[in-house]
Image (spheres, rainbow, N blue to C red):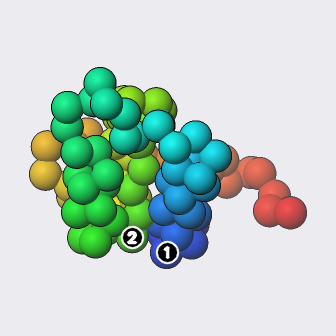
Amino acid sequence: MDLAALGASINETMLCWEKILPRVVAHPLIKLDLKRILKVYQKHYPGAMFSGCGGGYLIVASAEKVPGAFNVRVRIDPSRKAN
């Protein structure tokens, strides 16, 4: 339930992917500059990452609407106790 922490963690995930798997988003066969696209979203929203190798979906952590996106709402079962 902490948007800033979620955003920071998915941004960090992309940095880790780049170190571990350097061709995840930058590969000679990928014609789009995915790293540049990612940086734009990370600049305007708390966090952004690609869902997989070669891009896939762009996942954006945001409290506001993201143009062209579809929303995912996460609901928590109120009967579930927090640990």
Quadrant containing the C terminus is bottom right
* Three-letter amino acid code of the residue under disc 1: Ala
Q: Residue at x 29, y 62 (%)?
A: 39
Density class for disc 2 (Cα within 10 Å; few <14, some 14-19, many ≥20) is many
Res 13 visible: no
User: Where is residue 67 drawn, in percent x and y?
Assistant: 13, 51
* Helix, strand or loop for disc 1: helix
User: Where is residue 72 drawn, in percent x and y?
Assistant: 39, 42
- Residue occupying the far top of the picture: 29
- Residue occupying the far right of the picture: 83
Q: Residue at x 23, y 63 (%)?
A: 40
User: Where is residue 58 drawn, in percent x and y?
Assistant: 34, 42
Res 16 visible: yes
Q: Is residue 82 left or right of residue 76?
A: right
Residue nearest the observer in this picture, 31 or 70: 31
Q: Is residue 27 left or right of residue 52?
A: left
Residue nearest the observer in this picture, 20 or 7: 20
Residue nearest the observer in this picture, 27 or 3: 27
* Three-letter amino acid code of the residue under disc 2: Pro
Instruction: Write down the residue under mark 2.
Output: 46
Q: Are marks 2 and 1 in contact (CB under 8 Å)?
A: yes
Instruction: Write down the residue under mark 1.
Output: 4
Q: Quadrant of residue 32?
A: top left
Q: Give the Cα distance between marks 2 and 1.
A: 6 Å
Q: Is residue 18 left or right of residue 48?
A: right
